[in-house]
Structure formats: C-alpha cells, structure tokens
Image: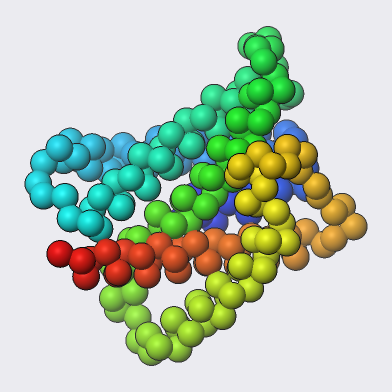
C-alpha cells in the first residue's frame, strides 16, 4: 500500500524536483526489497503445485514487474544527477534514460495491476460492494481518459522519449490523474483475477 501511495509522487519527478525524485525512488527501492523479503516464500513455491490460468497470469505479472523495477533502479542510479553522482557512472546515458522512462511506466501499470489481483482479500469484508464497485468503475472510466491525456502508452513503447510537464498545472490535478490511473489498473487486475479464476 505504501508503494502504491507514493507512485504519483514518483511519476511527477520534475514537479517534485530531481533530488526529491531520487529520494522517493530510493524509498521505493527499499520498500520493494522489504516487500519481496516478506513474501520470499512465494519464490520458493514457484515450481510447486498446479498452475491454474489465474496463477499463470499472476506469476507472469509478478516477474515482469520485478524486471521493470530492477531496470528502473539500475538505470535510475546510472543517470542520477544528485545522490549517486559520486559513483561517476556515465555509461550510455541516453540509452539508460530511455530504459528508465520505459521501465518506470511499465512498472507503474504492472504494479497497479498486481495490487488489483490481490483485491479479493481486501474487498471480502467491504459492505455495499455494488456501490464501491460502481465508484471504482466510474474512477476507472476517468482513468482511461487520464491515461490517454498523459501519454503513458507512448512512453511505454518509447514512441515519445521526452516527458512533458505542464508547470502551470496545479500538482493536485497531476496526482488526481495518476490516482485515477492506479484505480483503473487495479480494477483491471481485480477483474482479470476474477475472470481467470473462473477458468478451470
């Protein structure tokens, strides 16, 4: 949950400042290591048991997300202008910047989707589920608009390698758009998990 909550801050790197972006990135890295340590038993069970369609989907998402995070962290360190500048790493800076842009946006989508696949346990005790799901569906509809508006698809496939930030826009609107996108992909992950679990 903490990793999800700081995603909007991490995605708006120029709006929060480059130094703050690197600090938040390190925080995300620490949380990622902690999350994987807490769930380390999952790795030991990868080659055990039967693989249902839902498990195949979750496993694929997990490993793709891990790969994106690793690429994001390595490339982030290599293009660092502040906290890691003492390491004097300057190898293929332009390539690393492109990798960072691509991997970070894929990680944003996959992390939200991953959180949604575990939504069943979180929603089990929620009352008035229909009202809650209707609200999520409405926010997701706006999330589709925000996804197109912010051009994430172009960054994910490197069709645009330059991120545009509107500095005249209040930061709160940027956060609202990214929160809506988080809800969108969480909702997609939740429904995909439900759908795949129905497939025997």
Q: Quadrant of residue 198?
A: bottom left
Residue 80 lies, with reference to residue 122, above or below; the image says above
- With 60 as the anchor, is 17 left or right in this view? right
Residue 17: percent from the left, percent from the top? 77, 40
Residue 90 lies, with reference to residue 2, above or below; the image says above
Q: Residue at x 56, y 80 (%)?
A: 138
Residue 151: percent from the left, percent from the top? 70, 54
- With 160 as the anchor, is 58 left or right in this view? left
Residue 140: percent from the left, percent from the top? 55, 72
For the question of whether residue 112 can be seen, the reply is yes
Q: Residue at x 30, y 69 (%)?
A: 195
- With 164 as the anchor, is 44 left or right in this view? left
Please state, as top left, top right, bottom left or bottom right, where the N terminus lies in the image. bottom left
- The residue lying furthest to the front in this view is 159
Q: Residue at x 85, y 60 (%)?
A: 169
- With 169 as the anchor, is 161 left or right in this view? left
């Amino acid at each position: 949950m903490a990793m999800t909550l700081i995603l909007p801050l991490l995605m708006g790197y120029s709006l929060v400042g480059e130094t703050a972006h690197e600090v938040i990135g390190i925080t995300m890295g620490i949380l990622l290591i902690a999350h994987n340590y807490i769930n380390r038993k999952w790795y030991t069970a990868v080659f055990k048991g039967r693989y249902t369609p839902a498990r195949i989907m979750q496993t694929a998402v997990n490993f793709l997300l891990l790969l994106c995070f690793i690429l994001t962290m390595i490339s982030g360190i290599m293009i660092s202008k502040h906290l890691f500048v003492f390491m004097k790493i300057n190898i293929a800076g332009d390539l690393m910047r492109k990798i960072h842009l691509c991997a970070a946006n894929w990680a944003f989508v996959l992390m939200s989707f991953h959180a949604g696949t575990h939504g069943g346990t979180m929603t089990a005790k929620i009352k008035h589920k229909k009202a809650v799901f209707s609200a999520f569906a409405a926010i997701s509809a706006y999330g589709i608009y925000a996804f197109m508006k912010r051009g994430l698809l172009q960054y994910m496939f490197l069709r645009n390698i330059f991120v545009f930030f509107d500095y005249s826009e209040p930061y709160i609107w940027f956060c609202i758009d990214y929160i809506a996108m988080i809800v969108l992909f969480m909702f997609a992950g939740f429904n995909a998990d439900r759908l795949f679990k129905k497939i025997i």
